[in-house]
Amino acid sequence: MYVADEIGGAYVHGFVDVIDVEGRIIDIKTAKATPHGIESMNRFQVATYSQLAPGGFR
């Protein structure tokens, strides 16, 4: 799902991979090796999507 809006004076946009039946945003990443936790930029990306997605937190 394409999402876009203004947050704090900056225009942001992106594509949400999956929103489950409970409204949770799931961002699919690929990597050569198994990650050891969630990178801070990935957390930031999902937090931004949660504000932009319909029914998201604002």
Image: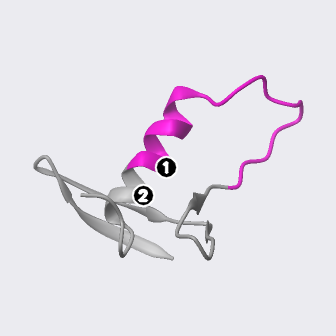
The kind of residue on which mark 1 rests is Val
- Say left or right for 4 vs 22: left
Q: Looking at the rendered structure, which numbered label has been put on residue 12?
A: none
Circle 2 Cα neighbour tier, 10 Å, few/some/many (<14 / 14–19 / ≥20): many
Given the current orientation, which residue lies at the most extreme front position? 22
The kind of residue on which mark 2 rests is Tyr
Q: Is residue 45 above or below residue 1?
A: above
- Say left or right for 56 vs 27: left
Image location (x, y in percent) of residue 42: 55, 39
What residue is pinned by disc 1? 46
Given the current orientation, which residue lies at the most extreme right position? 33
Q: 52 or 33: nearer the eye? A: 52
Count of marks placed on residues: 2
Given the current orientation, which residue lies at the most extreme left position? 9
Query: Residue drawn 47% across and 46% down?
Result: 45
What residue is pinned by disc 2? 49
Query: Residue drawn 63% across and 71% down?
Result: 20
Given the current orientation, which residue lies at the most extreme top position? 36
Cα separation between marks 2 and 1: 5 Å
Image location (x, y in percent) of residue 28: 70, 55
Q: 7 or 23: nearer the eye? A: 23
Q: Quadrant of the C terminus?
A: bottom left
Which region shows up in magenta? 28-47
> Could you say which quadrant of the image residue 56 lies in?
bottom left
> Could you say which quadrant of the image residue 24 lies in?
bottom right
